């Protein structure tokens, strides 16, 4: 198995839960969820392989009862749990409560049983009673036994709903964990990359560990894309399709709306025009659904009192890249003309990266707050006018409710030209057009450094931004 990078905090939490099982002799129930393909299964596998406890790892199928139950029993027979011997000798279970209780057979505090159910929503989609069955098994038996039950799911809405009142599993998990995508620092660590290269890689592969691992150490962006796009079945090409098929299996209209945003349309009017969804109520519902699923973000200019004009953005960096450059041209990749796709990427990379890196930089700076050099800022956004005549990349505010602006900033993600005096003068001019910026600090972010004497209050390099994220 290739090198496991990151997830130290998540592994620590899982270790804590297992330690509690060992010290108390009672069950613990971990509810783990996160977006598809961000490494939840890999994290769970790493945990069970290093936990020094017998375990069952069950990959739930999209199959109705009793197929799902039979597969669980088969997986139990192949596991290292004590119950495996019973199943091999013919012991069976006809219900989920009986099967889960069987898996806990002869578990002891010294040798607790770890039971992993991966992609639980697949079972529940076709057998709604599974949640109640898990509740019954937990309440009746597992919570009193030295068992660690770990349920994993990628359907965020379902996983949250299953543990909310009045759902059957409300109050049962002893710990809920939301696994986040890899950070830019995690991506950089996989490639032993410097800070600027780490962010550039992140703009292509996002926080998906498998994609990040597909980019070898030392390989340039052009060389990686040239080699990768030549294979129509490579993860960089097909993972976007898989994500949309899983998240939006029937929502054709929502896909059209998402394509418009991925193309670069950010306003309600522009999205309507590009997607062909002219009915405002229909478009509004599609946008809200994409927001609920975490696929897009809706932004308003800071400070909020400056206006209510929303802009929409694909939330994940990889999907931003995929929807912009790959999705519209998959047929070219399929017929062996990935060179055309690569040429477009190279032609538009500077414009795309300058836009795509801004939300990543905002998140990075926000992780540094509160910090004295940024005044009393607690939140970081941007500012724009309805006409687009004024746009400010970074606006730091102390409160989202009409608070004064602590700083305004400009991002220059150029590879070879540093942040210069002209850039600083433009920023000063724009500061005067943002409401409530009387004493706002000036912040500059530059990929290629800064000219001397630019007159900024804070100058941030890629290294400064990467340091905002925890070590892998």
Image: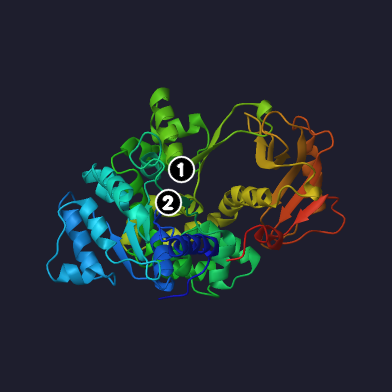
Counting from the top left corner in percent of width and height, residue 279 is at 39, 24
Q: Is 269 rendered above or below residue 138?
A: above
Determine which of the numbered discs, if any, sits on residue 294 in the image.
1
Q: Is residue 467 left or right of residue 458?
A: left
Q: Assign a secondary structure to mark 1.
A: loop
Write down the residue under mark 2.
35
Q: Is 6 rendered above or below residue 446?
A: below
Quadrant location of the C terminus in the rendered image = bottom right
Residue that appears at 64% across and 26% down: 307
Along the line of sight, the residue nearer the viewer: 111 or 135: 111
Q: How is the image coloured?
A: rainbow
Sequence-wise first label, 2 or 1: 2
Q: Characterize the local packing of mark 1: few (<14), some (14-19) or many (20 or more) Cα atoms within 10 angstroms.
A: some
Which quarter of the picture shows residue 447?
bottom right
Along the line of sight, the residue nearer the viewer: 462 or 74: 74
Q: Characterize the local packing of mark 2: few (<14), some (14-19) or many (20 or more) Cα atoms within 10 angstroms.
A: many
Kindly indicate whether the residue at mark 1 contacts the one at mark 2 (C-beta within 8 angstroms): yes
Quadrant location of the N terminus in the rendered image = bottom left
Q: Is residue 427 left or right of residue 57?
A: right
Counting from the top left corner in percent of width and height, residue 456 is at 83, 50
């Amino acid at each position: 198995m290739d090198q496991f990078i990151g997830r130290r905090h998540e592994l620590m939490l899982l270790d804590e839960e297992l330690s509690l099982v060992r010290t108390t002799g009672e069950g613990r129930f971990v509810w783990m969820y996160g977006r598809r393909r961000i490494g939840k299964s890999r994290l769970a596998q790493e945990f069970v392989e290093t936990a020094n406890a017998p375990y069952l790892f069950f990959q739930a199928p999209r199959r109705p009862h009793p197929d799902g139950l039979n597969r669980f029993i088969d997986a139990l027979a192949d596991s290292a749990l004590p119950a495996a011997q019973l199943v091999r000798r013919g012991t069976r279970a006809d219900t989920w409560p009986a099967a889960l209780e069987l898996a806990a057979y002869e578990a002891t505090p010294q040798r607790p049983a770890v039971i992993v159910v991966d992609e639980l929503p697949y079972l529940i989609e076709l057998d709604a009673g599974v949640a109640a069955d898990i509740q019954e098994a937990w309440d009746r038996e597992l919570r009193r036994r030295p068992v660690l039950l770990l349920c994993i799911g990628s359907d965020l809405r379902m996983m949250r709903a299953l543990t909310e009142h009045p759902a059957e599993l409300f109050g049962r998990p002893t710990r809920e964990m939301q696994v986040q995508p890899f950070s830019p620092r995690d991506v950089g660590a996989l490639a032993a990359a410097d800070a600027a290269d780490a962010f550039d890689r992140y703009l292509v592969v996002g926080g998906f560990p498998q994609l990040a691992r597909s980019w070898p150490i030392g390989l340039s962006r052009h060389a990686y894309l040239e080699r990768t796009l030549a294979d129509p079945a490579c993860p960089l090409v097909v993972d976007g399709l898989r994500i949309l098929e899983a998240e939006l299996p029937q929502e054709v209209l929502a896909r059209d709306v998402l394509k418009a945003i991925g193309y670069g349309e950010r306003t309600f009017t522009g999205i309507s025009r590009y997607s062909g969804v002219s009915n405002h109520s229909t478009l509004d519902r599609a946008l809200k659904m994409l927001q609920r699923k975490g696929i897009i973000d809706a932004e308003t200019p800071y400070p909020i009192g400056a206006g209510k004009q929303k802009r929409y953005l694909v939330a994940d960096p990889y999907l931003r890249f995929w929807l912009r450059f790959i999705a519209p041209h998959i047929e070219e990749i399929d017929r062996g003309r990935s060179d055309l796709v690569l040429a477009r990427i190279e032609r538009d990379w500077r414009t795309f990266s300058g836009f795509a890196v801004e939300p990543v930089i905002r998140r990075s700076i926000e992780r540094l707050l509160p910090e004295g050099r940024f005044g009393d800022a607690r939140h970081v956004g941007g500012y724009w006018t309805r006409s687009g005549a004024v746009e400010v990349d970074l606006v730091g505010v102390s409160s989202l409710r009409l608070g004064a602006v602590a700083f305004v900033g400009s991002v220059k993600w150029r590879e070879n030209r540093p942040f210069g005096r002209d850039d600083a003068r433009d920023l000063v001019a724009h500061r005067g057009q943002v409401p409530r910026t009387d004493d706002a600090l000036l912040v500059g972010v530059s990929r290629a450094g800064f000219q001397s004497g630019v007159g900024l209050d804070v100058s941030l390099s890629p290294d400064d931004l990467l340091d905002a994220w925890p070590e892998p």
